[in-house]
Amino acid sequence: MTEQPKVYKGIITDNGEHLSVRGKLFEGKVVSAKNKNTVVIQRENPLYITKTKRYARSTSTIHAYKSAKQEIKEGDIVVAAECRPIAKSVSFVVVEVKS
């Protein structure tokens, strides 16, 4: 059997607004979960260096919105999806907590 890709549609924020998910979808590790509604996610991107024909590690941090219902702590693996800008640095929303 083939697995169907998950589709994330109508995410509802704490104040009842609908948040449409579009664009990029990625998996990363939570580095900081100190804020009330925001988590900082770090993701690794393999970077290919043509001169040496090897891969190097490249990391980037992204701020993402989390619902008050979600129990997220540092070290968790989460799936984040792109949405409209919520704050100055927040344009992603956590849609799934894997571990």
Image (cartoon, rainbow, N blue to C red):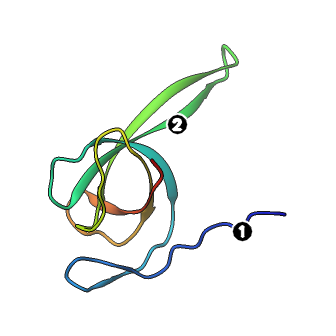
Q: Amino acid at mark 2?
A: Asn
Measuring from the top left, give residue 72's x and y in whole percent: 30, 52
At 44% from the left edge and 82% from the top edge, which residue is drawn?
10
Measuring from the top left, give residue 60's x and y in whole percent: 39, 38
Disc 2 designates what residue? 45
The image quarter containing residue 20 is: bottom left
Whether residue 13 sits left or right of residue 43 in the image: it is left
What label sits on residue 55 in the rendered view? none
Disc 1 designates what residue? 4
Q: Amino acid at mark 1?
A: Gln
Q: Secondary structure at mark 2?
A: strand
Whether residue 51 sits left or right of residue 85 in the image: it is right
Where 36 falls versus 58 (above or below)? Answer: below
Q: Which label's residue is closer to the chain start, 2 or 1?
A: 1
Q: Which one is in front in this view, the residue at disc 2 or the one at disc 1?
A: 1
Marker count (numbered): 2
Measuring from the top left, give residue 41's x and y in whole percent: 35, 45
Where 75 falls versus 99 (above or below)? Answer: above
At 49% from the left edge and 49% from the top edge, which residue is drawn?
27
